[in-house]
Structure formats: structure tokens, C-alpha cells
Image: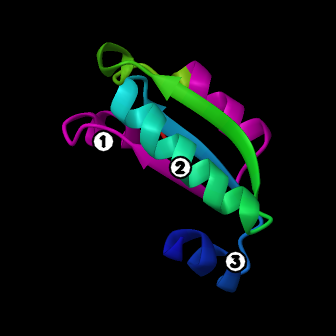
Amino acid sequence: SKTAQYLRAEGVSKVAFLYIHNAWGESVIGATRKTVELEGIEVSDDIPFSEESAGNLRTELARLKRNPPQRIFMISLPESIPLVMKQM
């Protein structure tokens, strides 16, 4: 994919996924995972969350701090994004 090729061109070697735990989120992340791995990019973490838990992801986000990726892919409903970003 163009995203994976862009990341490789930028020198990114490690990403993490933070995504809404539903069929749509899992589908998008599944396809993205395949393409980044084909480009040789490591997926350091895979963190699904429910729409209801978006306001309290401190435990999940602490995992990212222990093994920090160079980029985080976040797949979410628009209203959840500010809630998650405030916790980062």
C-alpha cells in the first residue's frame, strides 16, 4: 500500500495499532498490518478498544510507552479521537 511504502521511505521501522474493536476497525487494521509487514515494518503493539472505553485508555496507552513505536495508527470514530488524544 502507499501508506506502507511511505512509512518505509520515511525510515519508519516500528508502528503500533490503536483501533476501535468492531468489524470495521479490525478489517482496516488487518489489511494495514499485512501491508506494513510486507514492507518489513514491525508491529510493536495491537490495542483494540471499545467506543465506551475511549475516555479511559491509560492502561492501554501505558503499553505504548514501554515499547514506543515510531508511528501510531489510530482507527476510530471521529468523536473518540479527542478523548484518546487527551490521554497521550
- Residue type at mark 1? Ile
Dot 3 or dot 1: first in sequence order is: 3
Q: Residues within 10 Å of mark 3 (few under 14, many from 20)?
A: some
Camera-nearest label, 3 or 1: 3
Mark 1 — residue? 81
Say which quarter of the image contains residue 8: bottom right
CA separation, marks 3 and 1? 25 Å
Dot 3 or dot 2: first in sequence order is: 3
In the structure shown, which secondary structural element does the residue marked by tag 3 occupy?
A: helix
Q: Residue furthest top?
A: 52
Camera-nearest label, 2 or 1: 2
Q: Nearer the viewer, residue 19 or 22?
A: 22
Residue 76 horizontal/vertical position (percent): 33, 38
Q: Which mark is residue 54?
A: none
Say which quarter of the image contains residue 61: top right
- Residue type at mark 3? Arg
Q: Which mark is residue 8?
A: 3
Can you say which quadrant of the picture contains the N terminus? Answer: bottom right
Residue 41 horizontal/vertical position (percent): 76, 62
Q: Which mark is residue 31?
A: 2
Q: Which residues are magenta?
A: 59-87
Q: Is residue 52 magenta?
A: no
CA separation, marks 3 and 2? 17 Å
Residue 68 vs residue 76: left or right?
right
Query: Would you say residue 24 is visible in this rendering?
Result: yes
